[in-house]
Amino acid sequence: MEILIWLGAGISLVGLAGLVWCIVQVWKARRAGLSDEELRAAVQKVVPLNTGALFLSVIGLMLVVLGIALG
């Protein structure tokens, strides 16, 4: 079950990298001095990616817990 733990850790790291990327994108949009509507549009573009990255992180952590429980 060690492979399951490492696989889950890798997936979680990919999800974490995605979350950091989303944070950076929104931070750049906020610092760009966009109007309210433009900022809202920029954030709406990032929301699906943020949700997907969060999903990957959760799935990875579930695999880690499953690997520990079965191991």
Image: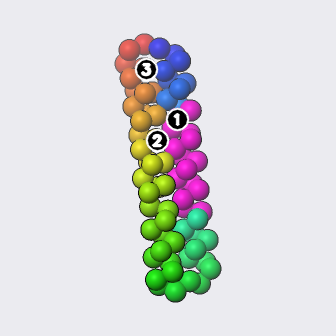
Of residues 13 and 52, which is closer to you in this image?
A: 52
In this rendering, the answer to whether 8 lies above or below 55 is above
The circle drawn on residue 57 is 2
Q: Earlier in the sequence, mark 2 or mark 3?
A: 2
Provide the secondary structure element on which disc 1 rests: helix
Q: Amino acid at mark 1?
A: Ile
Q: Amino acid at mark 3?
A: Gly
Q: Residue at x 48, y 21 (%)?
A: 4
The residue carrying pointer 2 sits among few (fewer than 14), some (14 to 19) or many (20 or more) residues within 10 Å by Cα, namely many
Distance from label 2 to label 3 (Cα)?
15 Å
Distance from label 1 to label 3 (Cα)?
13 Å
Q: Are marks 1 and 2 in contact (CB under 8 Å)?
A: yes
Q: Earlier in the sequence, mark 1 or mark 2?
A: 1
The residue carrying pointer 1 sits among few (fewer than 14), some (14 to 19) or many (20 or more) residues within 10 Å by Cα, namely many
The residue carrying pointer 3 sits among few (fewer than 14), some (14 to 19) or many (20 or more) residues within 10 Å by Cα, namely some
Q: Amino acid at mark 2?
A: Ser
Residue at mark 3: 67
Provide the secondary structure element on which disc 3 rests: helix
Q: Are marks 1 and 3 in contact (CB under 8 Å)?
A: no
Distance from label 1 to label 2 (Cα)?
7 Å
Q: Position of residue 63 (x, y in %)?
A: 43, 27
Image: magenta residue range? 10-24
Q: Quadrant of the C terminus?
A: top left
Residue at mark 1: 11
Q: Main secondary structure of the magenta part?
A: helix
